[in-house]
Amino acid sequence: MRVLFDQGTPAPLRESLPPHDVSTVYERGWSTFSNGELLEAAERDGYAVLVTTDTNLKYQQTLIARRVAIVVLLSTSWPRIQRVIGSVVAAIEGALPGSYTEVEIPYTDG
């Protein structure tokens, strides 16, 4: 599956997704794209999932007719994300075309 990391998504997360083809917005040269342009480019290039930390995306874009799934991490903190890496990977691997999923990232592991 092709996975695209938006800006703010910790790059080390890539190591937890070895069976997938992971790229970043920066690597693709799409860092200056608006959210709408980014979603269109991701779909055009065959990405199945966009992983982002942009919680405003659902308010800024019409997501109903999208083919790309969106997984939103509710933190940019890699140490915090690492504590729930199983939930993050499950959300990415379980994403369906056009779905929108937010992954809670607790402040503590307790």
Image: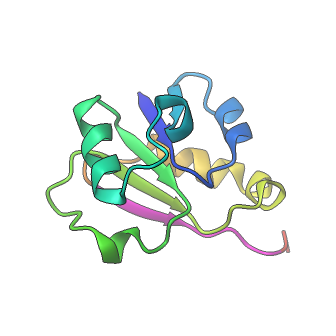
Residue at the far left in the pictured view: 65
Q: Position of residue 51 (x, y in %)?
A: 50, 49
Asked if residue 1 is among those painted magenta in the image, a careful observer would answer: no
Image coordinates for residue 50, horizontal then vertical, percent: 43, 47
Left or right placement of residue 58 versus residue 108 in this view: left
* Range of magenta residues: 99-107
From the viewer's side, name the closer residue of 14 and 54.
Answer: 54
Task: State the residue at coordinates (50%, 40%).
Answer: 25
Residue 105 within the segment the image draws in magenta: yes
Question: Residue at point 85% right, 74% down?
Answer: 110
Whole-percent x and y of residue 106? 74, 73
Question: In this rendering, is residue 86 above or below 80?
Answer: above
Residue 62, quarter of the rendered image: bottom left
* Picture quadrant where residue 19 is located: top right
Q: Which quadrant, please, contains the N terminus? A: top left
Looking at the image, is 94 positioned above or below residue 3? Answer: below
* Extreme residue in the front direction: 32
| Above or below: residue 77 compared with residue 110 | above
Left or right of 53 on screen, residue 69 = left
The residue positioned 45% from the left and 49% from the top of the image is: 32
Q: Is residue 56 left or right of residue 106?
A: left
Q: Count the labels in the image.
A: 0
Residue 39: horizontal and vertical position, in percent? 30, 49
